[in-house]
C-alpha cells in the first residue's frame, strides 16, 4: 500500500470526526436561540422542595440557595455542554443537569418545562425549572415554595391545637389566609429565601373564648411579624421572637 493510499482514509476519518463535534453553546441547545434574560439578567430559574432550594443562572454566574437559607453558593457560569437530553453546567462546587421534559412542582403544583438535578458541594438535589422567558417557567423566588399550599396548624408555642375550632393556613401565589380557632386573617405575603413577611392582615372581629382566644392571640402574633420558614417532608415551621407555629400539609 502506498503512502498516499494510507493517508486518504486517515484524512477522511478526521473530517467525519470534526463533523460530529459541536461547539458548546453557553445558553444551552434545547430552545430555539439563546433564552432572553429576565429583568435581573437571569435566563434560567429552578426550584426544589423538601428541602427547599433555588437556582438562578445568568450569563455571568450560577447562584444556588440551599435549604433553610444555607449558602448561597455562587460559581462563574460555564459554557453549557449539550447532553443527550438537555444541558449540563459543570463547576468545582456546582454541577447542574437540565433534562428537557415536563416537571410539576410537588408543593405549588406548577408545571415547568425542565427537570433539574443539582450537585452542590457534594449534596444532591432535584427539582423543576426552565428559561425565564417561557411563560410556564418557575414562579418568582419571592413566593415559590409556599404558593398554592394548604396547612393544618398542629401547635403554637408547643401547645397542641384544641379539639374544637378551625386551625389552618393557606397560601396562594401572593396571599395568605389563616385561622387559629376563631377569627379569620388574610393579607399579602412574600417569601425571600427562608424569611416570610406579611403585609397588613385583615381579620374578622368575633369575640372568642378560651382556649381559642389565647391560642389565636399567640398564633396571630407569629404571622404578623417576619418569620423564618423551615420545611421538612410534609411539615412547615414558622419561627420568630413571638413564638413558633408547627403545621402539617393538608
Image (tube, rainbow, N blue to C red):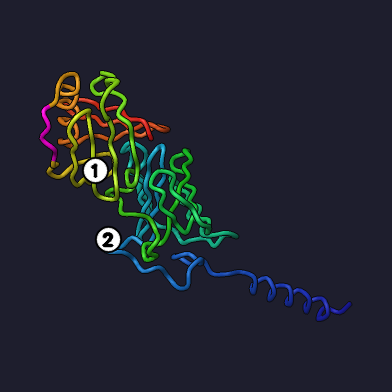
Q: Residues within 10 Å of mark 1 (few under 14, many from 20)?
A: many
The residue nearer to you, when weighing 176 against 31, is 176
Q: Residues within 10 Å of mark 2 (few under 14, many from 20)?
A: few
Q: CA distance from mark 2 to mark 1?
A: 26 Å
The residue nearer to you, when weighing 60 against 211, is 211
Q: Earlier in the sequence, mark 2 or mark 1?
A: 2
Asked if the residue at tag 1 contacts the one at tag 2, i.e. Cβ–Cβ closer than 8 Å, the answer is: no
Q: Which mark is residue 176?
A: 1
User: Which element type, helix, strand or loop, lies under badge 2?
Assistant: loop
Location of residue 69 with respect to 44 vertically, above or below: above
Q: Residue at x 36, y 34 (%)?
A: 231
By secondary structure, the bulk of the magenta-drawn segment is best described as: loop
Q: Which residues are magenta?
A: 203-207
| Count of numbered marks | 2
The residue nearer to you, when weighing 139 against 166, is 166
| Residue positioned most to the bottom | 4
Along the horizontal axis of the image, is 136 left or right of 31? left
Which residue matches tag 2? Answer: 40
Q: Which quadrant: the C terminus?
A: top left
Along the horizontal axis of the image, is 16 left or right of 200? right
Along the horizontal axis of the image, is 165 left or right of 80? left
Q: Position of residue 194 (x, y in %)?
A: 28, 39
Query: Which image quadrant for residue 185?
Result: top left
Label 2 or label 1, whichever lies nearer to me, is 1
The residue nearer to you, when weighing 116 against 113, is 113
Q: Residue at x 29, y 50 (%)?
A: 173
Residue 164 included in the magenta stretch of the image: no
Query: Which image quadrant for residue 76?
Result: bottom left
Q: Position of residue 74 (x, y in %)?
A: 35, 49
User: Which element type, helix, strand or loop, lies under badge 1?
Assistant: strand
Amino acid at each position: 500500500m502506498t503512502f498516499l493510499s494510507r493517508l486518504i482514509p486517515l484524512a477522511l476519518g478526521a473530517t467525519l470526526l470534526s463533523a460530529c463535534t459541536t461547539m458548546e453553546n453557553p445558553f444551552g441547545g434545547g430552545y430555539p436561540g439563546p433564552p432572553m434574560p429576565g429583568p435581573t439578567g437571569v435566563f434560567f430559574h429552578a426550584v426544589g422542595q423538601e428541602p427547599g432550594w433555588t437556582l438562578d443562572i445568568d450569563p455571568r454566574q450560577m447562584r444556588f440557595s440551599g435549604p433553610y437559607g444555607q449558602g448561597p453558593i455562587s460559581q462563574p457560569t460555564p459554557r453549557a455542554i449539550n447532553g443527550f437530553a438537555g444541558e449540563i453546567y459543570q463547576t468545582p462546587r456546582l454541577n447542574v443537569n437540565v433534562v428537557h421534559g415536563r416537571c410539576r412542582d410537588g408543593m405549588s403544583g406548577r408545571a415547568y418545562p425542565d427537570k433539574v438535578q443539582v450537585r452542590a458541594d457534594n449534596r444532591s438535589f432535584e427539582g423543576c425549572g426552565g428559561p425565564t422567558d417561557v411563560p410556564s417557567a418557575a414562579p418568582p423566588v419571592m413566593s415559590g415554595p409556599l404558593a398554592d399550599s394548604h396547612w393544618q396548624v398542629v401547635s403554637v408555642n408547643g401547645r397542641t391545637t384544641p379539639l374544637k375550632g378551625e386551625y389552618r393556613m393557606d397560601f396562594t401565589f401572593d396571599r395568605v389566609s389563616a385561622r387559629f380557632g376563631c377569627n379569620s386573617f388574610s393579607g399579602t405575603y412574600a417569601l425571600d429565601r427562608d424569611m416570610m413577611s406579611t403585609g397588613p392582615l385583615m381579620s374578622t372581629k368575633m369575640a372568642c373564648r378560651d382556649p381559642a382566644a389565647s391560642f389565636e392571640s399567640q398564633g396571630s402574633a407569629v404571622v404578623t411579624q417576619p418569620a423564618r420558614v423551615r420545611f421538612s417532608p410534609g411539615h412547615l415551621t414558622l419561627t420568630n421572637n413571638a413564638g413558633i407555629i408547627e403545621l402539617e400539609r393538608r
